[in-house]
Image (cartoon, helix red, strand yellow):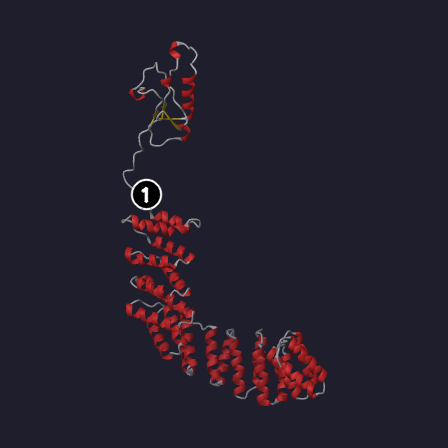
Amino acid sequence: MEVVNGVLCYPYTIAMAIWSSDWPLPSLPPRKTLSKTSLFISIPPTPSINPSSSRKSLFTNSSKPSSPLLDDTSNGLQLIHPPPRSQPSSTSELEITTDFIHGLCKNPTTESLAFQYYQKAREQHPQFKPESQTMSLLIRVLLKTKQWSSISALAGDFDVFGVFPGRLTCTRLISSCITSRKFKLTESLLSILESKEEIATYAFSSAMRSYNKLHMYSSTAMVFDRMRSSGVGVNPRGYLYIMDAHHKLGNTQMVVSLFHEFESKNWDFPEISAKIYAVVCESLGKSGKAFEALRYFREMVNKGILPNPSLYASLISSFAVIREAELAEDLFQEAKEKRMLKDMAVFLKFVVMYVDVGLVEKTLEVVEVMVEMKIRVTDCVLCAIVNGYMRRRGIRASVIAYERLISLGCEPGQVTYASMISIYWRVGLPKKAEDLFLEMIEKGFDKCVVAYSTMISMYGKLGRARDAMKLLAKMKENGLQA
């Protein structure tokens, strides 16, 4: 549209006006003559204008009766304007609802805007109150993008509105804060959540579990003390986490005390109970109280709670450490029958125990059990047996033991190879020592300084200086220093 002589006109109207003023119209029948002042544009006075209809012009004949609205009161063309739109009587249609925020949160393309609209709704509409689902969805979005300052601001609204996220969301929130080392935020969140009993128990339990994962056992103990002081209840997993923390801190007496407290609750959680018994037994065993640990173990079995492999491993290790071979063997056999010998450390401790008590022949029996159970015999076990035989039965006995281990299908590692190369040389079998060294190199163990040094020394004493120099050069080529 353009303004002509102070009047707003459509381009088509302007063209018609110019044409009618510059060139006279041809003569037409009287009732059909168009005058200059008979061209009007009328726009229906509706609240909304259809773009397609706005382009249509309505022409009227001046000879026809016209309404006052269409009377020509000027010398030019006039555009009849529609009345102004009526304003809505209220702002309800402009309000941001919780459903709108939920929709933003659930759409990956708009979730980043959800917290901004939540803040606008909170500031602009005093009657706005979020729902628990609103808080849960917002926390999920903010955790996804790690917006910690926004999470802190939102957490303050939990108390303001008296609305909290769901239990699972709260536990995830606490866990994420601790994992990300946001410890101050964690403390603030716990202070807010401790007033909500049904959520606080799980939130504090999540905090203890997360601190244990970071080996921050003292922080776990502080969280537990805070639970006690604020009157927050402890669930079965909470007892497990705090007992494990005190076990790692070496507070055996506290572990036992918490165990009795857990027992007084008469909860029926067999799986958690088995783990708690394992913590108690391991704590007692490591403090030298293996017999007391065994008493708790038998008590657990009598209650119908099935033991797990870690519990057997803990008990067997406890008796192996104090050299109670008979009890250790009984537990070992019991665990074997129940197919619960899965911890490699148990076999190594048995070997060490037999060596210490002078029963080195039984170390081979341990290996036979491992082979029977299709458990890989580690290099640590092989080396412990070879060195044990050498210490208890002499150097030649260690050669016999090694060859027996090889016949059982065991594969030595770098440490065992180095030990046996030295032993073969010391018993006067340089050829076997050399063959074993070449076998070691072929298997990829070419970084063992001890084995290289033994072979260079052997070559020197055998008068094979050239071989010694070649091996020394090979060492340097591999980046080793003699």
State whether residue 22 is above or below residue 313. Answer: above
**Quarter of the figure with residue 480:** bottom right
In-front residue for pair 96/297: 96
Crowding near the residue tagged with mark 1, few <14, some 14–19, many ≥20 C-alpha atoms within 10 Å: few
Image coords of residue 302 (percent x, y): 41, 75
- Visible residue check, residue 298: no
Q: Label 1, on which residue?
A: 94
Relative depth, front residue between 435 and 475: 475
Displayed quadrant of residue 33: top left
Q: Split into 4 quadrants, where in the image is the N terminus?
A: top left
User: Front-most of 24 and 126?
Assistant: 24
Asked if residue 370 shows in the view, the reply is: yes
Q: Residue at x 34, y 77 (%)?
A: 257
**Residue at 30% over, 70% down:** 228
Whether residue 395 sits left or right of residue 173 in the image: it is right
> In the rendered structure, which amino acid carries the disc numbered 1?
Leu
Q: SS of the residue at dot 1?
A: helix
The C terminus, quarter of image: bottom right
- Which residue shows up at 31% across the image and 67% down it? 233
Q: Residue 50 appears at what percent x and percent y?
A: 39, 30
The number of numbered discs placed on residues in the rendered structure image is 1
Expressed as whole percent of the image width and height from the top left, the position of residue 174 reads 38, 63
Q: Is residue 411 left or right of residue 104?
A: right
| Res 218 quadrant in image | bottom left
Using the image as rendered, state which of residue 62 and residue 25 is in the foreground. Answer: 25
* Residue 3 in picture, x, y percent from top left: 37, 27
